[in-house]
Image (cartoon, helix red, strand yellow):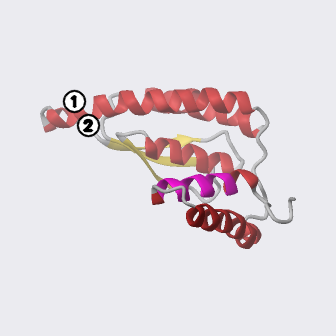
Amino acid sequence: MKRFFPAPVLSLVLFVVWLLLNGSISAGQLALGFVFAMLIPYFTQRYQPDRPRLRKPRVLLRLLGIVLWDVILSNLTVARQILGRESKLCSRFVWVPLKIRDPHGIVALASIITMTPGTLSADLTEDRHHLLVHALHVEDEAMLIACIQARYEGPLLEIFGC
């Protein structure tokens, strides 16, 4: 089974996304979706030699809830900020020191920051110890860093067992 479906979760996601994009569950779309769900992970498995190992899946669910809530709140905050006076915005770049060392965890953190409106991951140092984050409005750099570390990096440390 592992031979034909090296990444079963990826296969399932590809299958569902294929059906959603086509808006049809006809026999032809089901068959084509199944073929893509089987072949794409099979031919791309060599490009991902080390797979992420999730230590605490429950923490992952909690983190997803936190991120969803933060995205909703950030959308409202950013809308209020951009509709207000531009002179009130204080955007800047901030280097965030990282405790997480797992490459998958760093990518997850950078992605979460980028998905949250008003912030963007811009760079990572070569030694992977600092992440450059651009924020639309920063009143206190230390508070932004502490927020990122507590809300996102902390759970990711638990999830990836770093």
Q: What residue do we see at 72% from left, 35% from top?
A: 159
105 and 127: which is toward the camera: 105
Total number of numbered labels? Answer: 2
Q: Earlier in the sequence, mark 2 or mark 1?
A: 1
Taking 69 as reference, is 155 left or right?
Answer: right
Q: Can you tell which mark lies on residue 43?
A: none
Is residue 73 found inside the magenta-colored segment of the image?
no
Taking 103 as reference, is 130 left or right?
Answer: left
Is residue 13 found inside the magenta-colored segment of the image?
yes
Crowdedness of circle 1 by 10 Å Cα count: few (<14), some, many (20+)?
few
The local secondary structure at tag 2 comes to loop
Q: Which residues are magenta?
A: 11-21
Name the residue tied to disc 1.
80
Q: What residue do we see at 60% from left, 51% from top?
A: 107
Q: What residue do we see at 62% from left, 52% from top?
A: 13
**In the image, what residue type sits under mark 1?**
Arg
Q: Position of residue 7 (x, y in %)?
A: 75, 57
Residue extending farthest bottom: 43
The local secondary structure at tag 1 comes to helix
Q: In this rendering, is residue 5 above or below 64?
A: below
User: Distance of mark 2 from mark 1, alpha carbons?
Assistant: 14 Å
